[in-house]
Image: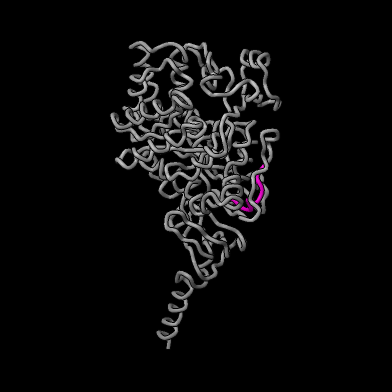
Amino acid sequence: MAIRHSILALGLLALFLWPGCGGAQDFDRVIRGGRVMDPETGLDAIRDIGIRGDTIERISESPLTGREVIDASGLVVAPGFIDLHQHTWDDESYAFKIRDGVTSILELEVGTDDVAAWYRAKEGKLPLHHGVAVGHIPVRMRVMGDFPGFLPKSDSRAAMVTADDAQLAALTAGIQRGLDAGAVAVGFGIRYTPAATSQEILAMFRQAAESRAACHVHLRERAARSVGSTLELIGMSATSGAALHLVHLSATGAASTPDLLRLVSEAQARGLDVTAEMYPWTAGMTDISAAMFGPGWQEEYGIGYGDLQWGATGERLTEESFRRYRESGGLVIIHSNTEAVVTAALKSPATFVASDGLAGHPRNAGTCARILGHYVRDRGEIDLMTALSKLSLLPARRLEARVPEMKRRGRIQPGCIADLTLFDLESVAEKATFTDPKQPSEGIAHVLVAGVPVVSQGRIVDGALPGRAIRAAVKKP
């Protein structure tokens, strides 16, 4: 009789502990009844998601139970959005990003010259995951004696002086220090350093290739001349073996964007690791004191003073105000593109989305919501799954060779990090504009970073700072 009771007790215990039964089904958090969309597997169905700690443990057709349940009925449950191109790093921008559904931001164009210090300064302080490139621009500014500054001025040594052998060796050493410190990529803004020769850039590409780091590059020239600049970089990628990523392709290519997209697609078809990004706005933004506004800029870009808008005030510039602001420096919006070019870039299989986020431009606050609301729901330019892939999966894949942990992001699958964005497809929309850029997006109901809610019922969760470093392996001295 005692043996029988023991067997019965063991059976009840096994039933209690069996996955899907009793207490073993109680997750830390459950996302209940949402339209779960995973761009890698193609899953698009009503499911429950069980989360333990920072990890997705189960995706179920049957109801799951948990200590906290988030009702996702009527909402799309997507992988958290990954933005590889963010320049403004402050609390206000972090708030805009998470309300736009972003769970990871990275600065991979300009980057930093001190990777270790960059990560130390942000440890435990952000609601999002974060990462950085070692940047050719800041390293060159340091080597040439122009540091500090975001971008080199048009008359600076970093912009105008060709590196000699000693300076080239110092540049090489600076890039290698950043890679050894775990930089995610190598960033380049060749348009801002016109004196950097092709041989100098190729030397940096070779270093990146040795560390399996992609080169994230702002083209040397714009508009009609961007075709030659793209061919230059594809040649460097082929020669060095480094992966190439072209930043804000449509903003740089303008009317030549279809030609650039074709070059990227042809390079991919021939086995080269070449990708590109775009953002869904017809105007760009940069520092008015940069080299790109040197003599002849009107002819190169096909625009005039009135196509420039001062970021701080929203005023359109004149020749007089242009000269005055160019002396002081500051951010200027450049109205130089067409909607047709932007749409073509978005629809191309060769691109994914990154914001190029800068305070004062609506792309800093509303890029993802604009893709989902304006281009998917309202205009039907791309389907929802394609949009989610461009916002999450493809950016994650761009980094996987250098940061294998990215294989657990940009997806909704068991074992993946629980970075999730829940939104209402009927109401999601950007509210930021060129005249009022500091407006958060609407329709993003919940955002989880590593399983922790940072947005709940459309509102920021105070004090939630679960963001972690996205970083390559650090090489010990």
Relative depth, front residue between 77 and 366: 366
Q: How many marks?
A: 0
Residue 210 picture location, percent across and down: 30, 31
What color scheme is it? one colour
Q: Residue at x 47, y 15 (%)?
A: 159
Residue 255 picture location, percent across and down: 50, 32
Relative depth, front residue between 246 and 224: 224
Horizontal relation, residue 313 to residue 216: left or right: right
Horizontal relation, residue 151 to residue 424: left or right: left
Residue 92 within the magenta-colored segment of the rendering? no
Q: In which quarter of the view is residue 211 placed?
A: top left
| Quarter that holds the C terminus | top left
Q: Which segment did they paint magenta?
A: 440-447
Residue 428 picture location, percent across and down: 63, 51
> Can residue 48 be seen?
yes
Horizontal relation, residue 363 to residue 136: left or right: right
Q: Residue at x 58, y 35 (%)?
A: 282
Residue 441 within the magenta-colored segment of the rendering? yes
> Can residue 134 be seen?
no
| Quarter that holds the N terminus | bottom left
Identify whether 342 is placed above or below 327: below
